[in-house]
Image (spheres, rainbow, N blue to C red):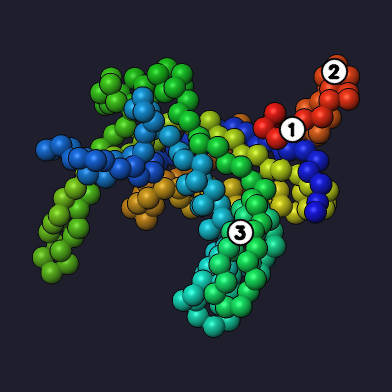
Amino acid sequence: MNKFTGKVFITGKIVAKTGLHVGGSKTSLDIGGVPLNVIKTANGFPFIPGSSLKGKLRSILAREVGSIGIGSEKYLPPNAIIDRQFSYIIELFGDANDKITDGTPPSVTPARLIVRDAMLDEDHFRINRHTLFSELDEDFYTESKWENTIKRMTGTAINPRQLERVPAGTQFDFEIIYNVFDDHQRECHLNHLIKAMRILEDDYLGGQGSRGCGKICFDNVTITIKKIDDYLGANVRRKLEGITFTSGCL
């Protein structure tokens, strides 16, 4: 068992360079409403779920090596390349192999990455609303984009529908945390993570990427490190001497 030695924090801004569509859900659709809406907080602010960002980063690294599955899925073709063949992918993003499908014993590898939800930078949005988003309603944080399908025989548009997007120029605060262990894999893991982030800037985040949505960039990125001693200051350490913690105390 490797020892936990600290955390690396990667923080900054995710800037939408084009309209961004990270899909949400509706329990009902109002007449004239937008069928393809974006995910929002309870207060109506769009955000980027950590699961969406983490999943995209993992898929980029998997695509680079030609992996088509996480592990021993039942319907993978023989000799398929899978994530489990690449230790850095599994160590970064985790692997919950809790079922035996091909004689492989069950195992669980917890993810070293924690990807927080990227929340809307509300101050930046309000300050720039009238210069960047002049056509938006004062009560909304998104725009609608009409899409349709082209009938190839006639060249006419059919099946028009609206797509809700976060406007280009919108900023979100992101935080990615990497748990450091004493196995000396930090440099390797972070190099792969930064590579995936750079590739993502030339790819897309969310849906409708082939139709122009989802170009983003990472801006004002900072990387900081906290070691175990940073969590336990000298004064606190003295106070905790001789105290035995039971489960659930911290």
Answer yes or no: do the residues labelled 3 and 1 have beta carbons within 8 Å? no
Q: Secondary structure at mark 2?
A: helix
Say which of marks 3 and 1 sits in front: 1
Say which of marks 2 and 3 sits in front: 2
Say which of marks 2 and 1 sits in front: 1
Q: Which residue is mark 1?
A: 246
Q: Position of residue 139 (x, y in %)?
A: 28, 21
How crowded is the residue under tag 3: few (<14 C-alpha within 10 Å), some, or many (20+)?
A: some
Q: Which residue is mark 3?
A: 95
Badge 2 or badge 3: first in the primary sequence: 3
Above or below, comparing residue 167 to residue 3 in the picture: above
Checking the image for residue 239, the label placed there is: 2
Residue drawn where x is 58% and y is 81% of the image:
79
- Distance (Cα) linking label 3 and label 1: 29 Å
Q: Secondary structure at mark 1?
A: loop
Above or below, comparing residue 12 to residue 53 in the picture: above
Checking the image for residue 6, the label placed there is: none
How crowded is the residue under tag 1: few (<14 C-alpha within 10 Å), some, or many (20+)?
A: few
- Residue 153: image quadrant is bottom left
* 205 sits left or right of 174 in the view: left
Q: Could you say which is closer to the camera, residue 188 or residue 149?
A: 188
Above or below, comparing residue 81 to residue 244 in the picture: below
